[in-house]
Image: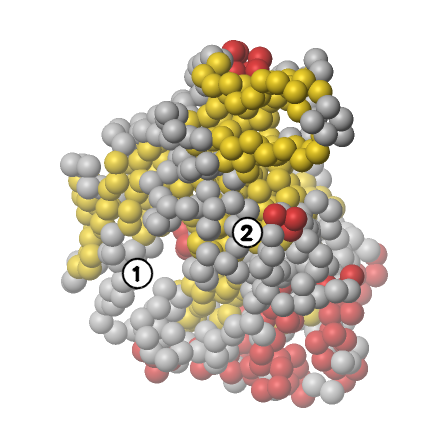
């Protein structure tokens, strides 16, 4: 018995986990709750009220009776597609290449061009069908402006993948199939809505497909095993059910009493493993169907072809407007070739000499010839896909290079804006490396910043500093994008003669407001690399809930009022993987919508064995040295409780005494000693205080 209208609103394929034997565990989707959340009605009640569902079934029956079930390629239906990548600058921000691959997989499947079609078992090989529907990235946006067909939106909604995420961006559903790519697709691999359920204009904003990034296409963050999920979801979007009916619970006996309203798909309980001999309801099951949950989907049937095409040409949910000639012209799929823009992406912008960068063409549309000028004397030109549009280039010499791409589609050519590549030499920074942000130029030749959202990033502040007149500042108070990341990275330092390196820094940060409700878990991460940044190791993380705050909460944009509102930390490293000529340091701030943050007095100091011996002397009284680093005079200060003998000596980096500041008896009370930089070159010195057999060594950096 066919149950034409007995299906729920929301359909989805649950996330699949595979074992080494390809056994699968299919998790149920939250179909009932999602329907109530979206429409305020249970699925059953919504069906009862839906005239569109009945109308679409009548149209499908009429489509069948008209003889449109023949397999000739008479009328290829073309549907414009737009991808909205909702991301948090993580792996869910998949490449354009992966998106193009996803559409290639879908078009292969819908047009029976998949290489594994010949693996369909004989019982169903004669009904494996070419659906004759193709999906092409839009070439114009809703305003008629040339566009890549891919939007990228930064939002924490990527971790929810629900209805609120769809509201971030949607192009008109009567012109585009909207596909949202995200980190979590509502707990599933992907989900869609039947056309009848979103027929009304009030629900049009929910129309489209949500898919998890790791189930999009066959490359990148996905793989070939997961690549058919989008095919499956477009099937739902065009009114196909699961072969066992409309539940998300395959494998249960009562599914034999359900149906998908397709005559040539046998009733089945549904499969999560590829049992090609399965006869769950008395007849051989079509386990290789794209709409089953088994991992071996390879086909649509002739009956499914009819149902898919009927939905695509129906006025229900305005599906028929998508493939109209006027819409194909409006979205740029029909008409003269369009070359909108020449552009490319790089795997890195700062590397070391001898390293390579991956250059990937992002030009659109229909580019078939590429000319790369790497500005180092090398030019790559040609028209071979996979060779000239995606290429690695090695930079052998340190310097700055402005790379340019000229792209052509056979009718016209365009030249990209130049991208600056910085190639570092080994040991580009002196030891010690001192960054107090006092220089008039920043970023400098030794320090680089990354502002992924192009919203301001790290900047110099003259309003606050721990020492000197300036610090590095990140305006976080008014930031509205959670998980926004901004990065500061050093150049290289040569540590091949060192036995230890110490990275010290100071920062100032606080919460918003005065209540616990305003506490935020912003993070400051410090990572190091011994191979120029090809691999980064996290060595310290300061979290908002624990060690990051240095001052009480401020109910206004935070500006530290003095040294007491700063924290400091020192990372000590002696592992051989870091003691190279390509040592680098990275500071990364991840916003969780807290207050402003400041960084100052970054010191990177490499120690040989003699310098380290001085540093390891016993700890003595509580002496302070400021400012440090200093460009001029520094002050050494201490308070003593009684009279005693003391010696204050200054050592250079070689461990030699170069000055005796004091040698005699100290009386009880406060003492200040002026340390002059005169006759001392820039670099690291050690101020050693010896009192009553105890000693303390302070590092003094002169800039």
- Judging from the image, what secondary structure is the residue with disc 1 in? loop
Q: Tell me: 304 left or right of 78.
A: right
| Residue 509, disc | none
Location of residue 407 with respect to 74 vertically, above or below: above
Q: How far apart are the alpha carbons under marks 2 and 1?
A: 41 Å
**Do we see residue 427 in this rendering?**
no
| Residue 598, disc | 2
Q: Tell me: 573 left or right of 497.
A: right
67, 145: nearer the viewer: 145
Residue at image position (27%, 66%) is: 340
User: Residue 208: x percent and y percent?
Assistant: 56, 71
* Mark positioned earlier in the residue sequence (2 or 1): 1
632, 559: nearer the viewer: 632
Residue at image position (50%, 64%) is: 153
Q: In what quadrant of the picture does the N terminus appear?
A: bottom right
User: Residue 581: x percent and y percent?
Assistant: 40, 22
User: Residue 622: x percent and y percent?
Assistant: 69, 30
**Do we see residue 556 in this rendering?**
yes
Q: Tell me: 515 left or right of 344.
A: right
Location of residue 649 with respect to 419 vertically, above or below: above
558, 239: nearer the viewer: 558
Give the image quarter of residue 341: bottom left
| Residue 364, disc | 1
């Amino acid at each position: 018995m066919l149950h034409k209208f007995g299906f729920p609103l929301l359909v989805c394929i649950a996330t699949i986990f595979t074992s080494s034997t390809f056994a699968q565990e299919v998790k149920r989707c939250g179909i009932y709750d999602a329907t109530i959340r979206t429409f305020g009605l249970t699925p059953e009640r919504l069906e009862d009220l839906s005239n569109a569902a009945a109308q679409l079934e009548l149209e499908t029956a009429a489509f069948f009776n008209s003889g449109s079930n023949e397999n000739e390629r008479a009328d290829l239906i073309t549907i414009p597609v737009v991808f909205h990548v909702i991301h948090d600058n993580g792996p869910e921000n998949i490449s354009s290449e992966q998106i193009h691959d996803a559409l290639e997989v879908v078009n292969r499947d819908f047009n029976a061009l998949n290489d594994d079609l010949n693996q369909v078992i004989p019982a169903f090989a004669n009904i494996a069908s070419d659906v004759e529907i193709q999906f092409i990235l839009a070439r114009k946006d809703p305003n008629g402006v040339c566009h890549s067909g891919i939007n990228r939106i930064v939002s924490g909604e990527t971790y929810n993948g629900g209805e609120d995420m769809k509201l971030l961006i949607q192009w008109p559903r009567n012109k585009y199939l909207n596909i949202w790519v995200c980190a979590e697709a509502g707990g599933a691999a992907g989900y869609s809505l039947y056309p009848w359920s979103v027929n009304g204009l009030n629900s049009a904003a929910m129309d489209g497909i949500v898919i998890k990034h790791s189930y999009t296409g066959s490359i990148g963050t996905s793989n070939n095993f997961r690549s058919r999920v989008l095919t499956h979801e477009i099937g739902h979007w065009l009114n196909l059910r699961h072969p066992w009916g409309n539940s998300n619970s395959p494998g249960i006996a009562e599914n034999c009493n359900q149906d998908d309203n397709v005559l040539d798909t046998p009733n089945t309980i549904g499969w999560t493993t590829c049992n090609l001999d399965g006869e769950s309801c008395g007849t051989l099951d079509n386990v290789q169907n794209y709409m089953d949950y088994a991992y071996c989907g390879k086909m649509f049937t002739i009956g499914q072809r009819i149902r898919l095409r009927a939905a695509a040409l129906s006025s229900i949910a305005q599906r028929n407007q998508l493939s109209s000639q006027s819409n194909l012209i409006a979205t740029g799929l029909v008409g003269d070739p369009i070359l909108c823009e020449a552009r490319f992406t790089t795997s890195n912008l700062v590397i070391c000499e001898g390293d390579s960068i991956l250059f990937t063409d992002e030009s659109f549309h229909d580019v078939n010839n590429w000319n790369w000028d790497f500005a180092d004397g090398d030019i790559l030109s040609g028209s071979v896909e996979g060779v000239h549009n995606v290429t690695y280039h090695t930079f052998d010499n340190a310097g700055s290079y402005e790379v340019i791409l000229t792209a052509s589609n056979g009718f016209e050519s365009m030249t990209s804006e130049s991208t600056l590549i910085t190639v570092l030499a080994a040991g580009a920074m002196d030891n010690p490396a001192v960054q107090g942000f006092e220089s008039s130029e920043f970023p400098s030749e030794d320090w680089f910043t990354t502002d992924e959202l192009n919203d301001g990033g790290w900047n110099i502040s003259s309003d606050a500093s721990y020492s000197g007149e300036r610090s590095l500042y990140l305006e976080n108070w008014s930031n509205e994008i959670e998980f926004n990341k901004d990065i500061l990275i050093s150049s290289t330092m040569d540590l091949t003669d060192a036995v230890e390196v110490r990275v010290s820094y100071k920062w100032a940060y606080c919460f918003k407001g005065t209540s616990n409700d305003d506490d935020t878990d912003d993070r400051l991460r410090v990572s190091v690399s011994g191979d120029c940044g090809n691999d980064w190791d996290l060595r310290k993380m300061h979290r908002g809930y624990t060690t990051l705050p240095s001052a009480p909460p401020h109910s206004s944009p935070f500006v530290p009022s003095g040294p007491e509102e700063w924290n400091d930390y020192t990372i000590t490293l002696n592992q051989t993987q870091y003691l190279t000529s390509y040592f680098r340091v990275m500071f990364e701030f991840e916003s969780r919508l807290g207050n402003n943050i400041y960084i100052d007095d970054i010191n990177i100091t490499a120690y040989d064995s003699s310098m380290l011996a001085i540093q390891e002397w016993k700890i003595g009284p509580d002496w302070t040295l400021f400012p440090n680093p200093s460009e001029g005079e520094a002050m050494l200060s201490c308070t003593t409780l009684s009279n005693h003998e003391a010696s204050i000596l200054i050592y250079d980096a070689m461990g030699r005494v170069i000055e005796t500041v004091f040698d005699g008896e100290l009386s009880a009370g406060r003492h200040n000693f002026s340390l002059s930089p005169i006759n001392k070159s820039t670099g690291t010195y050690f101020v050693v205080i010896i009192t009553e057999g105890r000693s303390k060594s302070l590092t003094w950096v002169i800039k």
